[in-house]
């Protein structure tokens, strides 16, 4: 199964049979446990990592066959103006970020194959991260204690979430949290930046000349397709996910996550708008899921989510994520689920 994932990442054309086997990297939705932790092998791949420092048990780290940088990060991104792009479906999702008045978009059709982009906008070095296994897309400031970090992919998972590493110290980082969990920088955290995943149509309509990430080599991956076919509609057993997920919430159900709080996407979709303290959550239709059909532009409509905070200057963009429910419960074990009439805070 691990070899299937690695081969899929190297594929230059769609491989339907392999994608069906790999189906969401195979391991998660088929209920197969990834290979156990192997620190001896890690040390050979990461000779500069200080494995004497770690904040999580080594046994939490798993591998499905991928190795260091076998899922290649993008560190010299190529862009085109939004109004010049013809091969992205109007409802396909893009991860967008605005910094000091400049907006850029990173299509999930590219991110799902590379997972990490090291970029700089208006002098601000950013890490654009996307983990397809938990549907988590987060943008971070790459500056830490006066140093600018550059990131790659360890090829490992923790709680089915990507584990990154920085080239500077080879410390290992949890993508969902932006926190170093192994190595010299253990315990350090990156600053998350407001971003959102929206349809290409919405992004282009608001910023027609803004830059959009395009593949450096169009045929290097099966861009426009996804190996995560029907993952988002599966009703996996809760026993496959050893996390404290509230009753009535499926592990692969999407949730809107703001810090230590989460709302089921289904609840927001029904309400269209939810206000909680200074937060305003909104939903509108018109965004393809990358966890549904083989070709992304045929994916079912999961809608667009925005989260903003009220301030003296009006509504301002908040830091949030739209991810699978199991990921919130795994990484925010004391977090609060807003379920409507009955709120849930794990013990």
Image (cartoon, rainbow, N blue to C red):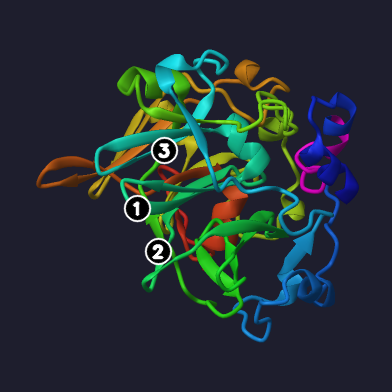
Q: Earlier in the sequence, mark 1 or mark 3?
A: 1
- In contact (CB < 8 Å): disc 1 and disc 2: yes
Where disc 1 sits, the SS reads strand
Crowd rating for badge 1 (residues with CA inside 10 Å; few <14, some 14–19, many 20+): some
The image shows residue 47 at horizontal and vertical percentages of 73, 76
Over which residues does the magenta segment extend? Answer: 20-30
Q: Main secondary structure of the magenta part?
A: loop
| 315 or 139: nearer the viewer | 139
The image shows residue 262 at horizontal and vertical percentages of 45, 49
Q: Which residue is at a point 41% across and 30% down the rendered structure image?
A: 211
Left or right, 200 with reference to 154: left
Mark number for residue 45? none
Give the residue at mark 1.
124
In the displayed structure, 277 sits above or below 234; it is below
The image shows residue 333 at horizontal and vertical percentages of 54, 64
Give the residue at mark 2.
143
What whole-number distance in Å separates the C-alpha atoms at marks 1 and 2? 8 Å
Q: Residue 197: say if magenta.
A: no
What whole-number distance in Å separates the C-alpha atoms at marks 3 and 2? 21 Å
């Amino acid at each position: 199964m691990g070899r299937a994932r690695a081969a899929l990442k190297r594929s230059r054309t769609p491989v339907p049979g392999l994608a069906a086997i790999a189906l969401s990297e195979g391991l998660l939705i088929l209920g197969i446990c990834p290979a156990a932790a192997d620190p001896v092998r890690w040390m050979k791949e990461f000779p500069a990592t200080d494995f004497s420092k770690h904040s999580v048990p080594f046994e939490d780290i798993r591998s499905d066959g991928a190795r260091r940088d076998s899922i290649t990060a993008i560190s010299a991104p190529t862009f085109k103006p939004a109004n010049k792009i013809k091969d992205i479906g109007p409802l396909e999702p893009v991860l967008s970020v605005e910094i000091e008045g400049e907006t850029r978009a990173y299509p999930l059709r590219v991110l799902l194959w590379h997972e990490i982009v090291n970029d700089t906008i208006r002098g601000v070095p950013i890490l654009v991260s996307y983990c397809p296994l938990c549907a988590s897309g987060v943008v971070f400031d790459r500056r830490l204690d006066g140093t600018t970090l550059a990131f790659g992919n360890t090829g490992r998972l923790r709680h089915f979430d990507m584990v990154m590493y920085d080239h500077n110290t080879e410390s290992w980082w949890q993508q969902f949290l932006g926190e170093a969990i192994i190595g010299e920088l253990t315990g350090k955290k990156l600053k998350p930046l407001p971003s959102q995943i929206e349809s290409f149509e919405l992004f282009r309509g608001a910023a027609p000349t803004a830059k959009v990430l395009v593949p450096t080599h169009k045929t290097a991956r099966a861009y426009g397709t996804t190996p995560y076919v029907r993952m988002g509609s599966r009703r996996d057993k809760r026993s496959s996910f050893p996390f404290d997920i509230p009753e009535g919430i499926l592990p692969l159900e999407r949730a809107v996550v703001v810090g230590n709080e989460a709302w089921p996407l289904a609840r927001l979709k029904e309400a269209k708008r939810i206000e909680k303290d200074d937060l305003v959550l909104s939903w509108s239709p018109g965004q393809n899921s990358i966890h549904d059909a083989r070709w992304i532009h045929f994916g079912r409509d999961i809608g667009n989510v925005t989260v903003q905070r009220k301030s003296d200057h009006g509504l301002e963009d908040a830091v949030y994520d739209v991810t699978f429910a199991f990921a919130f419960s795994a990484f925010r074990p004391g977090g609060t689920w807003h379920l409507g009439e009955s709120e849930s805070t794990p013990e």
